[in-house]
Image (cartoon, rainbow, N blue to C red):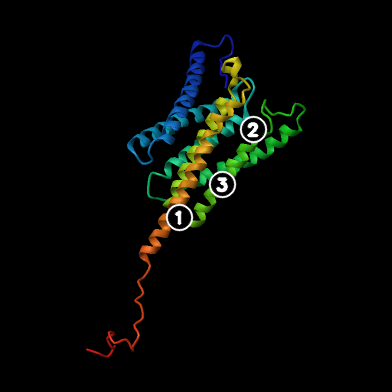
């Protein structure tokens, strides 16, 4: 995102534009670093909590600035508006999933469902417009850039609809909700930087296929932890069933000399 005040603007407008640009960039950088740290730290530890809270605050700043400023750029970036709103929604809902042992639907979740469904609708419309445009792009973005909105918005909408249907989620589903939403928000940030901001990188790095590795890393780590949580939860459930299973006494034959007759006192 390039944010500059028009030439000849008052000093305060130039200062405000520079401050917003700095906040957006700083929020993104801190978000990438803190998000990576949270993924590598032991889950549930104090360090993980600090890194996670830092991630929430920094991503909130980055996403809010991006969503508000993008329509007023010299070339309006509609994709950045939706990306900012979706990122903000994912971070807030993911953070709320670990605030309490049970997650129940509320006003924030209802607003989030609207954002998720709106993201899917916008992604479909803009992908079609980009495909049908003479340049094959929309605001400089190819149709593929909008597919991510459709997929992530769709998953988020399904999750919210299940939350409203069940009334609440707890245990492993609650942790899964937290994990995938945080990782999806981190993926939006990593993809936007490593794939969408290559002009700020050294010339020899631009267009390198290796940039896909850090961009897609949050999705790989997310898949690993979701699979691990499912396996662990399955093992714990199986163990709990074995422990809670009723003990059935073995039948005693009546003709056994050592057996005690039921009528004996």
Disc assigned to residue 207 = none
Disc assigned to residue 145 = 2
User: Residue sitting at 37 percent across and 38 percent down?
Assistant: 42
Q: Which residue is mark 1?
A: 234
Numbered disc in front, either 3 or 2 = 2
Work out which residue is located at the far top of the displayed protein and give it.
Answer: 8
Could you tell me residue 229's position as x and y percent? 45, 48
Numbered disc in front, either 3 or 1 = 1
- In three-dimensional space, the C-alpha distance between marks 2 and 1, rounded to whole angstroms, equals 36 Å
Q: Which element is circle 2 on?
A: helix
Relative to 241, does residue 61 appear above or below in the rendering?
above
- In three-dimensional space, the C-alpha distance between marks 3 and 2, rounded to whole angstroms, equals 19 Å
Disc assigned to residue 157 = 3
Q: Residues within 10 Å of mark 3 (few under 14, many from 20)?
A: many
Task: Identify the image quadrant of the N terminus.
Answer: top right
User: Residue sitting at 72 percent across and 37 percent down?
Assistant: 128
Q: Nearer the viewer, residue 127 or 210?
A: 210
Relative to 226, does residue 215 appear above or below in the rendering?
above
User: Residue sitting at 50 percent across and 38 percent down?
Assistant: 221
Task: Work out whether mark 3 precedes mark 2 in sequence or the reverse, and give the earlier one.
Answer: 2
Quadrant of the rendered structure where residue 47 is? top left
């Amino acid at each position: 995102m390039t944010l500059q005040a028009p030439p000849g603007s008052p000093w305060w407008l130039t200062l405000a534009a520079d401050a917003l640009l700095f906040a957006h960039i700083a929020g993104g950088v801190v978000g990438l670093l803190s998000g990576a740290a949270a993924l590598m730290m032991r889950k549930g530890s104090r360090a993980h909590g600090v890194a996670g809270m830092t991630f929430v605050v920094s991503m909130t700043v980055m996403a809010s600035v991006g969503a508000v400023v993008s329509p007023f750029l010299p070339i309006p970036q509609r994709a950045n508006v939706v990306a900012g709103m979706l990122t903000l929604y994912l971070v807030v809902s993911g953070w709320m999933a670990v605030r309490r042992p049970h997650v129940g639907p509320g006003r924030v979740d209802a607003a989030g469902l609207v954002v998720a469904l709106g993201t899917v609708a916008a992604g479909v419309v803009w992908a079609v417009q980009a495909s049908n445009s003479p340049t094959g792009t929309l605001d400089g973005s190819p149709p593929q850039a909008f597919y991510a909105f459709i997929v992530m918005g769709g998953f988020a909408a399904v999750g919210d609809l299940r939350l409203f249907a069940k009334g609440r989620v707890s245990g492993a589903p609650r942790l899964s909700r937290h994990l995938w939403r945080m990782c999806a928000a981190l993926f939006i940030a990593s993809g936007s930087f490593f794939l969408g901001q290559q002009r700020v990188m050294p010339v020899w790095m631009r267009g390198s296929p290796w940039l896909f590795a850090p961009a897609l890393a949050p999705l790989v780590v997310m898949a690993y932890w979701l699979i691990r949580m499912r396996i662990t939860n399955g093992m714990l459930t199986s163990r709990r069933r074995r422990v809670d299973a009723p003990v059935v006494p073995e039948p005693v034959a009546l003709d056994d000399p050592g057996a005690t007759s039921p009528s004996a006192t």
